[in-house]
Image (cartoon, helix red, strand yellow):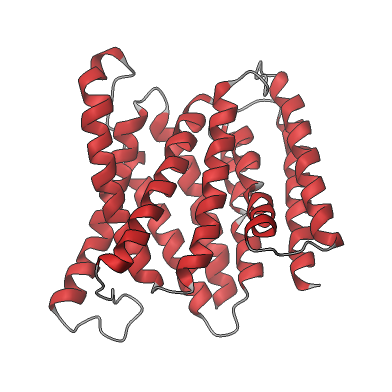
Amino acid sequence: MWLALAFLSASLLGLYDVSKKQALKGNAVIPVLFLNTLFSSFIFAPFIIMSATTSVLDDTMLYVPIHGWEVHKFIVLKSFIVLASWLFGYFGMKHLPITIVGPINATRPVMVLLGALLIFGERLNAYQWVGVLLAIVSFMLLSRSGKKEGIDFRHNRWIYFVILASVFGAVSALYDKYLMKRFDSMMVQSWFTLYQSIIMGVVLMVLWYPKRKQTSPFRWSWAIPLISIFLCVADFAYFTSLSQAGSLISVVSMVRRGSVIVSFLCGALLFREKNLRSKALDLLLVLLGMLFLYIGSKA
């Protein structure tokens, strides 16, 4: 069951990326991200309220424990880290082909692994080093593929935005490792979505609203609520998978990275993106690198 949930989470994450790409086409980034966080908070707010005021959710996986500021301050920090990743990622997704953004994001486990090496003192074995090297080679080949579309990796700021999004995403994953050892996963997931909507509301009013007529106009798209729905259900399937008896975090994480296959195929079929053959080779190397990371985690 836990493996099926992992595959479900991966598929939904791919559709989450596709929804982002569709919602951001010619659209203002900050309002789209704000609405994404707002709709996500609407999904989880009932669980917070019901857990605090009734006993309906007691002893279920949907129960949200009540804690004070000594816990919430850690969740607020997570909200800032994730929002930094999303802001950079949304801008990058708007201006770059999804068939380039997806493979770059898929290298995130390599960053997490290197972060674990530096922060937690973990050691890499030969398989994991091969996975890291394959990810580096795939990035270099992806740069070559990008040049065919006029995208210079060294001088394109949106490439740096996607890389920064992946770095902050890796920091978030490492921070999750710290949080999940100390706090309930449902509490972290529900409260950080609420804090994100508050933070993005401030960003919207301070940075975007006063200059809204000087930037890309905002237009409604039904892809916007789909972003929140796909993400929330994907994360819920992920956390539920990890809570199942016998589940393996290394396998679940590996399967989740397979979301790039869904986004890549949609980029080819829905957005008619170019140079798919060379990008497919780059993607294959990324997935091969992830396979070596998985083998290394089992060695």
Q: Which of 93 and 22 is in front in this view?
A: 93
Where is 271 relative to 71, above or below?
Answer: above
Task: Relative to 38, say whether 143 is above or below.
Answer: above
**Residue 172 x %, y %:** 50, 54
Residue at horizontal 31 percent and vertical 86 percent from the top: 59
Q: In which quarter of the image is residue 127?
A: bottom right
The answer to which of 181 and 159 lies nearer the viewer is 181
Q: In which quarter of the image is the N terminus?
A: bottom right
Residue at horizontal 21%, vertical 76%?
A: 51
Residue at the far left in the pictured view: 53
Q: Name the side, left or right, on which 143 lies relative to 108.
A: right
For residue 36, say whether it is visible: yes
Q: Which of the 4 quarters of the picture holds residue 74?
A: bottom left
For the C terminus, give its image quadrant: bottom right
Residue 14 in view: no
Q: Which of 159 and 246 is in front in this view?
A: 159
Q: Which residue is drawn at 27% across and 59% down?
A: 43
Closer to the camera, 70 or 63? Answer: 70
Q: Residue 113 at x, y = what percent?
A: 68, 56
Task: Count numbered badges in the picture.
Answer: 0
Q: Where is residue 57 in the image (x, y as percent from the top left)?
A: 25, 80
Location of residue 90 in the rendering, given as x and y in whole percent from the top left corner: 45, 35
Q: In the image, is 291 to the left or to the right of 235? A: right
Q: In this rendering, is residue 146 above or below 36?
A: above
Relative vertical location of residue 232 with respect to residue 222 in this rendering, above or below: below
Residue at 46% in and 59% down: 234
Q: Which residue lies furthest to the top in this view?
A: 214
